[in-house]
Image (tube, coloured by chain):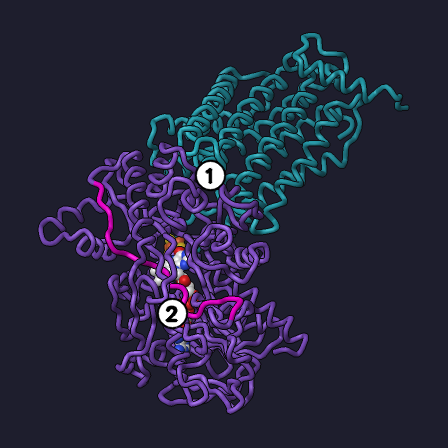
Chain colours: A cyan, B purple
Amino acid sequence: MRTRARPADRLRALQDALAGNARSPALLRSEPPVGAQESADVARLLNAGCAILASSVLADSSMEHYRGSFENKAMFVPPIVSTLALIASLHGASDRSARAERRRDAIYALSAAAAAAGFGFHLYNVGKRDGGFCWENFFYAAPIGAPWALLLSGTLGVAAERVRDTRPGGIPHIFGMAAGRLLAGLTSAGLLGTVGEVWLLHFRGAFQDPFMYLPVTLPPVGAGLLASAALSSKPKKRPLTRFWMKLVTVLGLAGMGFHIYGVHRNMGGWRNWSQNVLNGPPIPAPPSFTGLGLAGLAALRLLEGPKNE
Amino acid sequence: MTEDDPTRVPRAKNGRAPDVLRVGGWVPMRCFADDEQVDFVIVGTGAGGGTLSCKLSEYGFSVVALDVGPYWRPLEDFASDEHEQYKLYWTDERISGGEDALELGRNNSGQSVGGSMVHFAMVSLRFRPEWFKSRSLLGYGVDWPVDWREMWGYYREVEENLCLAGPIKYPWGPPRPRYPYRPHELNAAAKVLARGCEKLGIKWCSTPIATLSAPRGLAHPCVYRGFCIAGCSTNAKQSAINTWLPRALKAGAEIRDLAMVGRVELDANGRVRGVHYHREGQWRFQRARNVVVAGYAIETPRLLLNSACPQAPDGLANSSGLVGKYLMAHCNQGVYGVFDDEIRWYKAPPSLSLTEHWNYTDEGKDFDGGYAYMSQGPLPVEWSGTQTGNHKLWGESLLRDMERYNHYAGLKIVGECQAMETNTVRLADEKDRFGLPIANVTFAHSDNDKKLIAHAKNFMRTALEAAGGYDIWAEETETAHLMGTCRMGDDPRSSVVNPDGRTWDVPNLWICDGSLFPTSGGVNPSLTIQAMACRIADRIKALAARAEV
Ligand SMILES: Cc1cc2nc3c(=O)[nH]c(=O)nc-3n(C[C@H](O)[C@H](O)[C@H](O)COP(=O)(O)OP(=O)(O)OC[C@H]3O[C@@H](n4cnc5c(N)ncnc54)[C@H](O)[C@@H]3O)c2cc1C
Ligand code: SF4
C-alpha cells in the first residue's frame, strides 16, 4: 500500500542527493541486491551503451574536425580518446568477470575529463566569434553539445566498473548511492542534455521534416519515466519505462536512417557523398540515443531486481 | 540548334510545362485557346506577374501569363560560367542616356520565365513602415496609398512562400514573426561587415535571404558556391520560377514562354480586349477580360506607350502624362578594401550580412531617405568589370590587383533614390527584333541622391577601416534595382494606377510590378513587389465578389 507521505519523501531524498548530502537517505541507498553474474551482465550492458556512445563520438568528431581541418591540435583529442573509450567498452562488453578493470577505469575517467575540456573549447569558440554568444554562433560555431556524448560514455563507463565491483549478494553502490538509481538519474540527465543539443540543431534546420520532432519529444518522456524510477521506493516491474528505453534505443538507429536520407537531399545526393556527408545531417550522431537507451535498460535491471526480469 | 533549345523553341505548350524541380520532368498545364476569353492575361512572370499569376489562379480565375523569356530548367540549363549566364539578362537593344545614364541589363533587368528574380541576389527586406507615408511622416517624396500594417501581413505571406532564412530577431522596425528558416552561416565577407559595425557600435544582422538553409521538398539547401546572380543551379534560391509559378500551374494557370506582348488592344468603349503577342514566328491575339502588365519599370511603360491607339493617342492609361515618368534606380555604390586574412568573398550568397542602421536612424543625415549596406561577393568576371570601370585599372596594375581578389572585402549600399519627373522611359525610333519601338531611358541622380551617396561612402570607408581593411577605394557610379514609371496613388492626376493596381483610365487594365513604386525606400524591392502582388490579388478577389471586375 502506498502512503501519502511518499512523494514528499522522494523529493526530499532527491534534494539531499542533489545537495551532495554525504549520508544519502535510505531511499536512495536502497536497491535489490545482485548476484555476481548479474552485476557483470549489467556492467556489460552498460559497456555496450558506452561503446555505442564512443563510436558515435569517434565518427562524428573525426568528420567534423576533419571538416574543420584539425586547425587546432586539440581537435585530435576526441577521436583519439573516443577510440580508446571504444576499445575499453568493447573489452568490457566481452568481459564476464565480476571485477573492475583498472585500465578501463582510467580510460573512462580520461574521456570524461577530455569531454569536460571539450566543453570549454567549444564554448570559447562560440564566444570568440563576431557577435559572441548569439544564435548564429550557437548554430555554426563548435557545437556546444557535442562533447556531451563523450562525457556520458566516460561517466557511464566509470559507473559500469563500480557495478561490476559489487560483492556477490550485495547492493551495487556508486559514491554512496544505489547504482541503479544513480544510473537511472544519470541516463535521464544524459537524455535531456542530448535532447538539448538535438533541439538546437533541428531548430537550425527549422524542423523542416516533421520526423525531426521525434528526438525532442520521445526521449524527454523516457527521461521522466527513468527519473521517476530512480526515485521510487520499491523495486517493481516497469514495463512502460522498459518499453520506452527500447523505443529510445530504436530511435537512435532510426535517426541514423533519417540522416542517411537527409544527406541525399543535398545537391548531388549520395553521388556527391564526399561533400554531402559533411554538409548534411551528421549520420553518426543519433545513435547516442541508442547508447543511452541501453544504459537506461541497465539501470532498470538494477532497479527492478533480477527476479523482476 | 537542338530541339530543346529553350531560347528558340517554347517549352511550355501542348498541355505541359517544365517541372523545374526534377531533371527532365514535366508538370501538366491547362491550356487556353487564343479566342477563349480568359479572366486575366498577365504580361511578365517575375516578382509581380509570377506572384499574381499564382494568387489569381488559386482564387479560381482563368489566367494566361506570357513572358518573352525562356523557360529555364535551373538544374540543367545553368552553367558555372558568368558569361554563359548573361543569357538571363534583358540584353535586347535599349537606348540609355542622361547625366547618369543607366547601364541596362546585368544589374537591373532579366528576361526569363520567373523574371529578374531568376538572377536576383535574394536579399528580401521589408520597407520601413514610415516609408509608406514618407511625405506625411518624413517630409520627402510622396505617400503610398496603402497602410504599412496591411503590407506587414502580405510581407509575411511572401516570406513564407519563399521560405526565407533570416535572423531569429530582426533588430529594426516593428516586431515581425520568426523567419521560416534559420539564418545561414556567415562567410568571411559577411563577418567583415559585422566586425565593422561592432567597432562602430551600430547594429547589424544576418540578411533575411531567399535561399534555403535546410531542404524544402525537392529543393536542395544552398551549397554556398556563390553563383546566385548568375542563376542558381540547385534550386536553393527561392524565387518566382520555383515557388509561385509551380503553384500557379497547379492551380490551372497557363504560362507561355518566348511570348512577346507587343500591344494591348483597346476596344471602342475604352476597355482592353486582349493582347497581341508574338510566339513561334507569328503574331497572335489572346482575348481577355482583364490585362495585367508586369514587365518591370522599363518594359511596362514601353508596352503602354507602344499600345497607343486613336482612343489613347499618348499610350494606354496615360491621361496623367505620367506613364514612363519618375523612374528610380537604387544607388548602389560599393566601398572595397584589402584584408590580411583570406576572405574568398565569392563563396556563399553575396550579401549574407547587412545593416539597416541608416534606414532607421534619422539623426546625423544631411539628406532625405536612407540606405542599407550589405557585404559583397562579386564573381571574378564581374569584379574585373568593376576594376576596369570604376577603379580604372588596366594592364599590369589590373593584373596585380586581381591577384588580391581573395583578400578583398566590400560593403555596398542599397540607397533610396528620389523620384524625379525628368527620369523617364520613352519610345525611341529604333525597332527591336519584333519590329516594336525600343525604350529610351533617361536618368540622372538628384542632389539628394548625391548627398546620400557621399554620406554612405564615407561611413562605409570608416567601417571597412575599423574592420581592418586597407587600400580602400569607393565606386563612383553604380545603380541597381529599377522602380517607378507607373506610380500608384490616390489621385488620377498625379498617378497612373489606383491603390488596387488598376489603371485610372482603363478599368480592366492593371499594373503589378516594380513600376508601381511611388518612392523607392532604402531596401531591395522584390519582397515589396511580391507583397503588393498578393495585396492586389486580394483586392481583385474582393472586387470580383462585388462584380466590380
Ligand atoms: C542582378 C540583380 C540582383 C538583384 N537582387 C535583388 C535582391 O537581392 N533583392 C531584391 O529584392 N531584388 C533584387 N533584384 C531586383 C528584383 O529582381 C526586381 O526588382 C524584381 O524582379 C522586379 O520584379 P518585376 O515583376 O517588376 O519584374 P521582373 O521580375 O523583371 O519580371 C518582368 C518579366 O516581364 C517580362 N516581360 C517584360 N516585357 C514583356 C513583354 N512585353 N512581353 C512579355 N514579357 C515581358 C520579362 O521577360 C520579365 O521576365 C535584383 C535584380 C538584379 C538584376
Ligand atoms: S550560393 Fe546558394 S543560392 Fe547561390 S547559387 Fe549557390 S546554391 Fe544557389
Which image quarter is the N terminus of chain B in? bottom left
Mark 1 Cα within 10 Å, few/some/many (few <14, many 20+)? Answer: many
Which residue is painted at 34% across and 72% down in the image? B425
Name the mark on residue B518.
none
Q: Label 1 to label 2, Cα distance in Å?
A: 44 Å
Along the viewing direction, whichever of A16 and B406 lies nearer the viewer:
B406
In the picture, measured across the screen, residue A288 lies left or right of residue B9, that is right
Task: Tell me which corner region of the image, top left, top right, bottom left or bottom right, holds residue B11.
Answer: bottom left
Tell me where residue B293 appears, x and y as whole percent.
Answer: 46, 75
Residue B300 can be seen, yes or no: no
Q: Which residues are magenta?
A: B472-491
Which residue is painted at 46% across and 47% down in the image? A280
Q: Is residue A215 magenta?
A: no
Which image quarter is the C terminus of chain B in? bottom right
Tell me where residue B87 appears, x and y as whole percent.
Answer: 31, 69
Residue with the mark numbered 1? A136
Residue with the mark numbered 2? B325
Along the viewing direction, whichever of B124 and A292 lies nearer the viewer:
B124
Along the viewing direction, whichever of B468 and B422 lies nearer the viewer:
B422
